[in-house]
Image: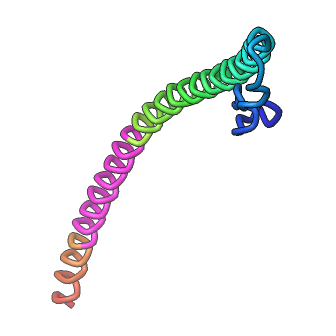
Amino acid sequence: MSELKLTQDRMKTYNGEDNKGAFKTSARLETFGERQNAANELLAANVNELIKRVCLLEDQQVRNNEIMKKLASELTAFKAEIDRLKLTAKLNTNAVQRLNNAINLASGSSSEEQ
């Protein structure tokens, strides 16, 4: 797009030169028309390039939204798994604690008897 870069010189379609003489109007109009056509072509090329870039950005946004939705569902599943593991760990800790208490009670009552 660098060769299509819009500059003030490239967009200048009338420069005010050759204003003298009544019979030079058609030549001036032809020059103006050629310059205007060149400027229009530059503008059209730049607009088309911008449209392509916007379309690419829109496509990327759609893909990013899909990826974010997948990530959100994965995170939800991951959180549920972590919660399940926490609960399992807590239940196992409580079971271990109860077994430890039972062993202590059993060994405590036998140690008191001795």
Residue 73 inside the magenta-drawn segment = no
Q: Quadrant of residue 49?
A: top right
Which residue is at a point 62% across and 23% down the rendered structure image? Answer: 47
Q: Which is nearer the eye, 87 or 52? A: 52
**Residue 69 placed where, x, y %?**
43, 31
Residue at image coords 58%, 22%: 55
Residue at 77 percent of width and 30 percent of height: 17
- Classify residue 17 as left or right of residue 69: right
Give the residue at x 79% y 37%. Answer: 2
Decide: is 47 above or below 73.
above
Residue 24, given in percent of the width and then of the height, sits at: 79, 14
Vertical position of residue 46 compared to residue 37: above or below: below
Which color mode does the image show?
A: rainbow
Question: Which quadrant: the C terminus?
Answer: bottom left
Q: Quadrant of the N terminus?
A: top right
Q: List x then y, in percent, for residue 108.
A: 20, 83
Looking at the image, residue 59 sits to the left or right of residue 35; the answer is left
| 17 sits to left or right of 101 | right
Location of residue 98 by image quarter:
bottom left
Main secondary structure type of the part rendered in magenta: helix
Q: Nearer the viewer, residue 112 or 9?
A: 9
Front residue (pair 99, 91): 91
Where is residue 9 drawn, in percent x and y?
75, 37
Seen from the viewer's position, the closer of residues 46 and 104 is 46
Q: Is residue 85 magenta?
A: yes
Q: Is residue 34 left or right of residue 86?
A: right
The part of the chain drawn in magenta is 76-100
Count of numbered circles on the image: 0
